[in-house]
Amino acid sequence: MGEPDGPEGRLRRFATIWSRAVFPVTSTSLTRVEFEAQLLPLARRLSEALRARNHTADEARAVGAALVAAHCTDPEALTRTLDCIDAYLVLYCGGDGPQEDLRARSSRLQHAMAAGYAQALRERTLAEQESIAQAALAAQGVVAQALHASEARFRAVFEGAAIGISIADLEGNILQVNGALSRMFGGAEQNLRSRNVTEWTHPEDAPQVWRLYEELVRGEREHYHVEKAFYRPDGTVLWTNLTVSLLRDADGNPQYQLALMEDTTERRLLNLRLRYEATHDALTGLPNRTLFFERLEKALNGAEGQRFGLCYLDLDGFKTINDSLGHAAGDRLLVEVADRLQACATAPGEMVARLGGDEFVALTTGPDTEREVDELAARIMNALLAPVRIDGRELTVRGSIGVVEGPAGERGPAEVLRSADITMYRAKSAGGNRFELADEEADARAITRHGLTTALPTALERGEFFIEYQPLVHLGDGSVRGAEALVRWLHPQHGVLGPDRFIPLAEHTGLIVPLGRWVLEESVRQARVWRERHSDTGPMRINVNLSPCQLSHPGLVQDTVEILERTGVRPDALCLEVTESALIGADDDLLKPLRRLAEMGVDIALDDFGTGYSNLANLRRLPVSVLKLDRSFTQSMQQFPADPVDLKIVEGIVTLAHSLDLTVTVEGVETGAQAEQLRILGCDTAQGWYYARPGPPDRLHELALVDATA
């Protein structure tokens, strides 16, 4: 036994509350205490499901089915159970977990439990119906004999039945009805006996109902079973499970038709309620993802000539509102947005749904959606213009919309929604508060980026990366002083990919750290090979790029030291290139690893200098020994004469760099005129296609030998 305030005590308290709520509407011979003991293991299963790490709905569905097995078949029993779980399950059984997560799990448990309850109730009802139907069929002979032999016995069975029974002739004239049937229709027996079966049509009759009836009265069918609606005299609708059987005389000729009716109106209302809750968002009342996909699939399977238009909306900055004002304010904002969106989609063929979080979709269908979807997107953007007032604050609502439009029958729901999602993020990356139209080429690029992102981790393991080297040439004597290591990806489908295709993806996923470590080790190992095989050509320095992620990684210095020691390469043979933009506003903590490497003798190069708009005075505090001018400076020198202003700028940078004991390297040299001009301006080294394109390490050494013997 647990302590009164322990987990077992709280669990028993929850079971007590549950039994007190449900027992009054339960058809059971147990006492309330015995009924509570029956509910305790069900409460324990709900408690364990609430706290389970991997949440599944199976346990909750099983508990719902167990309620039916415990004779809790009154719909009020389910309602009281769900209210009890909603109010007390997290309170007594939630433990110390995050309340919002527990509330969300409790809500999902309630939905699953209601679904299990409805399924079990339906199976039990079908079993009862089958039993009744079998009993009715078995009683056909008895009824026929009773009509001939014992009217008294027939009347006892007829009037005592709990289900509605009526007898009609083959022309459909009602001859007799029992009290249960009269009560179902809320009228006198005399009114029912004046009716004809064929008068009881209803707009929701299934197409086969009257076909089956005609077959039965012609003697071609012995019985049939359908779900059928009837109008009561007061105009309300009665839903029934209807079984109609053919009664034959002693010679086997059709004589009467016998109808057995079970009132299923309350059960149908419960099913409709459960269906609504399963297909609508609890917060906003909008259709949810399940119902939206049903409508979208129907639209995409439309007839020839039909089209569809889809607007995929994501609110801009919604997380900020949640974080600053709380989730209650965020929920009120979502409700207001949902109301505005619903007012935008009122035409036939239009609907709005909430997919989850702050994501909404609007769907329009018809033959002219090319125009209508643009107008729908514009209406949504206009609807979001007015601020939303919450707790005395006026909140500005912004949204990004991806629009997809096209003919039915060409794409599936998942493909359409993926295109809309990609387009929405394109609108968001363009600044947000706008809508963009889907573009197949942009979709393809996004899908390719996603494929490359997912393939990156295994690509490094499979050895799909390789390094090319571009020489660094001394402008004074034309000798090769070193090389920059440039990583490439030999992709199985896309061929050789340059760093611009995958380095941003590697930085985004964090793979840049192991990839950068591999590049550094391979490059330093190649520098050692050059030194051992060709020591007569002079020292060769290797330049390796560092990304901002690597720069802030705590293992940078240790990894570099271990690689240099393991390969036996001197620190002054390595130059690490860091972009100027990565060091703008860098604090001492970020610069500390670079200073330690510089103190060891590793050169630090400031790459792409001139593009980051950094203060030149910052050069005094940066541990750099090399400035690499961006290629934009060399492009202005392709024409002769070069722009004198650009020449003055480069000359000033070189003078400043030399006064700070920095060497200057220039990228993007493509002509001899550029190389000569840069030499005159005092630049130290250069690289570019004029000297050589990036290539394998052996080709670099061949170039060095040619320069050495020139």
Image: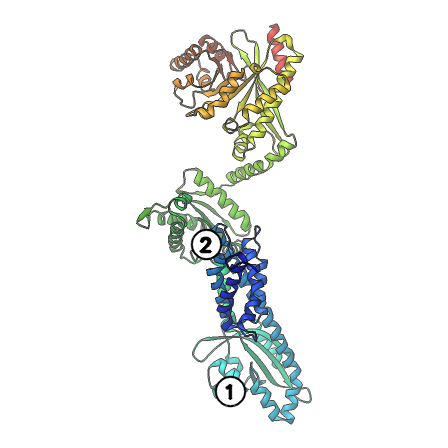
Disc 1 element? helix
Q: Quadrant of the N terminus?
A: bottom right
Q: Position of residue 66 (x, y in %)?
A: 59, 66
Q: Nearer the viewer, residue 248 or 562?
A: 562
Q: Quadrant of the C terminus?
A: top right
Relative to 99, is 465 above or below? above
Badge 1 is on which residue?
193
Which residue lies at the image location 53% right of the left edge and 53% below the top edge?
300
Marks 2/1: CA distance? 49 Å
Q: Amino acid at mark 1?
A: Arg
Specify few, some or many for label 2: CA neighbours under 10 Å numbering under 14, 14-19, or 20 or more: many
Disc 2 element? strand
Q: Position of residue 492 (x, y in %)?
A: 64, 33
Q: Position of residue 339 (x, y in %)?
A: 38, 55
Badge 2 is on which residue?
353
Residue 57 occupies quadrant: bottom right
Q: Seen in the image, is 394 located left or right of residue 175?
A: left
Q: Position of residue 161 (x, y in %)?
A: 57, 84
**Outermost residue toward the right in this view:** 251
Disc number at residue 606? none
Residue 564 occupies quadrant: top right
Dot placed on the residue nearer the N-terminal end, 2 or 1 = 1
Give the color scheme: rainbow, by chain, secondary structure or one colour: rainbow
Relative to 401, is 705 above or below? above
